[in-house]
Amino acid sequence: MRSSTFGADRAKPAFLVSSAMSWIVVEAATAAREITDANPACWRLVQETLDRDVELVSHENFKERSAHARAVIRTGEATPCANVLLRCGVPFA
């Protein structure tokens, strides 16, 4: 299922992110600066879902940081710049 738009036909990836948010504690988030222009719908979803400031960095810096990831959630999202790095903590409740 490939699409050049982000929306109803892309509901599964958005659902995966929302589901993941119920079992992880997000301390910080980083996205490629290009998301704001290349994929504004995804950028809005990221902002609404995370409900926190998201650090925007260059695409090259984003790729460098992603090389150090300890876990990856592959959603199948095929729209541009739809990746977000999450720094997660531990729930103490």
Image (cartoon, grey):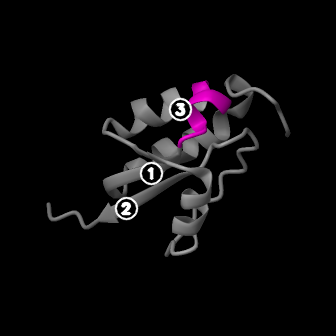
First in sequence, mark 1 or 2: give its number: 1
Q: Are marks 3 and 1 in contact (CB under 8 Å)?
A: no
Rendered residue at 48%/36% (across/down): 46
Q: Secondary structure at mark 3?
A: helix
**Left of 25 or right of it: where is 3?**
right
Farthest-out residue, right: 2
Q: Separation of disc 2 and disc 3 at Cα?
A: 18 Å
* Secondary structure predominantly adopted by residues drawn in magenta: helix
x then y, percent, for residue 68: 51, 75
Could you say which is closer to the camera, residue 5 or residue 14?
A: 5
Q: Secondary structure at mark 1?
A: strand
- Provide the residue designation for mark 3: 43
How crowded pointer 3 is (Cα within 10 Å; few <14, some 14-19, many 20+) is rated as many
Q: Quadrant of the C terminus?
A: bottom left
Residue appearing at x 37%, y 61% in the figure:
87
Q: Nearer the viewer, residue 71 or 39?
A: 39
Q: CA distance from mark 1 to mark 2?
A: 8 Å
Quadrant, the N terminus? top right
Q: Are marks 1 and 2 in contact (CB under 8 Å)?
A: yes
| Residue kind at label 2, given as amino acid type | Arg
Residue interval drawn in magenta: 33-41
The residue where tag 2 is placed is 87
Q: Residue at x 66, y 40 (%)?
A: 12
Mark 3 residue type: Trp
Q: Is residue 21 magenta?
A: no
38 part of magenta stretch? yes
Closer to the chain start, of discs 2 and 3, is 3
Q: Nearer the viewer, mark 1 or mark 2?
A: 1
Residue under label 1, please give it. 30
